[in-house]
Image (tube, grey):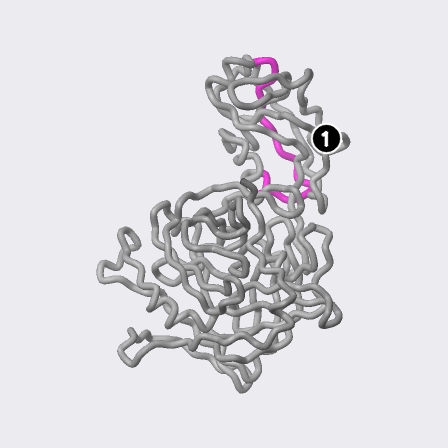
Amino acid sequence: MNAVPARLAAIALLAASPLALAACGGDDDSPKASVSTQSSGSGSVTAIPDIQSDSGSQKGLAIDPRTIYTRLGGGVVTIIAAGATNTDAGGLGSGFVISDKGEIVTNAHVVSLGEKATSPVAKRVFVRFADRNQVAAKVVGTDRFNDVAVLKIDPKDLDLVKLRFAGPEDAHVGDPVVAIGSPFGEEQSVSEGVISALDRSIRSTSGFDTVDAIQTDAAINRGNSGGPLLDARGRVIGINSQIETSSGDGSGVGFAISAKTVERAIEQIRGTGKAKYPYLGVSTVGVYPQLAKEFDLGTDSGAWIQDIPKGGPGDDAGLRGPSGPARAFQVSSFAPGGDVIVGIDDQPVKTSTDVAEVVQGFKPGQTVTMKIFRGGKERDVKVKLGTRPAVAPKG
């Protein structure tokens, strides 16, 4: 099965009559919350406090989708992207308000005219709110590596509900979650599930992996892209981005870009309109004891280099890739002879995913010390990190 963007790219929806919007709110007996409201021109911005439980603890906290939707649904929007004319192909996805300045975050692929890293940004983007207001938006910038985009609208005359991000320590496997978005164009839809796994690695349109992704069984379908995945306290723990499917529809395996990764992308986009990340220039596989024994790697954990693009930072620094043709072992094939990375600047590397996670914490141009095993012996190699290219190169 392949992970594909959870994008609704149906021009029929864009050309059809405006979709009916579900009312945002609840019955008179809906739980009430103390909120903070600030004036923004002639509109307002409402900051919703964390939803609390009787125990006051996240551990074992039951989730209340109705309360979350009632308080926060107004902060979730539908994103409509189109080309220069009404006949140009476009897409429809989701997003949510993140600031009182009218900033909205969504997936980069929602506002892109195509599924490639080099696809142009939509000429026209509109944001539709739960209260039926629909306004034009400017694309401030995108991070194609982590599938994040920041939009800006004029908050004047709008009543905005601002969502808040959770911290990286707030997500745990088994925690209940709620997704809000516009699957198949059905706006303001709510689904419930749990965090199925953390620290997943998913492939971006650039060909590079997005690490630290969250896996969930909450129903995620085309059109949910860019919408929030919320915890029991109503905090955003991630942006719904991909589904793993054999049919094109959701099948119980969805992926969200983690709040930590999204916030890092937002900070860069606010500053320069784009995101830059360091580039090591290696392709690796994770080491496990049986693999280590079969190929005499000298360590039973780490990231084994299977490819080094020519002229990349790793190649320039003298890291070694395979020295011979691949041969079968168990259910895969592996090329012998490459270095095994076990540490980067005193940070341990135990799996292939660890390499991207650790390197992401540095800046382009910085020099790091790679601790490797070569020929069964440990040594250090200094590597000056480059800037990640728009599309992952081939070795």
> Percent from the top left, x then y, of residue 15?
65, 72
Residue furthest right as drawn: 311
Q: Is residue 260 visible?
A: no
Q: Is 288 positioned to the left or the right of 265 in the image?
A: left
Is residue 373 magenta-colored?
Answer: yes
Is residue 193 magenta-colored?
Answer: no
Q: Nearer the viewer, residue 218 or 317?
A: 218
> Percent from the top left, x then y, of residue 208?
63, 42
| Residue in the image at 71% along x and 28% along y | 317
| Residue in the image at 49% along x and 54% along y | 259
The quarter of the picture where the C terminus appears is: top right
User: Badge 1 is on which residue?
Assistant: 395
134 versus 388 height, above or below: below
Type of amino acid under label 1: Gly
The quarter of the picture where the N terminus appears is: top right
Q: The magenta stretch spans which residues?
A: 359-376
Q: Is residue 33 visible?
A: yes
221 versus 13 height, above or below: above
Q: Is 249 positioned to the left or the right of 195 in the image?
A: right
| Residue in the image at 69% along x and 43% along y | 388
For label 1, count other residues whose C-alpha is less than 10 Å away and answer few (under 14), some (14-19) or many (20+): some
> Percent from the top left, x then y, of residue 74?
45, 73
Q: Secondary structure at mark 1?
A: loop
| Residue in the image at 60% along x and 53% along y | 147
The picture quadrant where one finds residue 87 is bottom right
Q: Nearer the viewer, residue 3 or 324?
A: 3
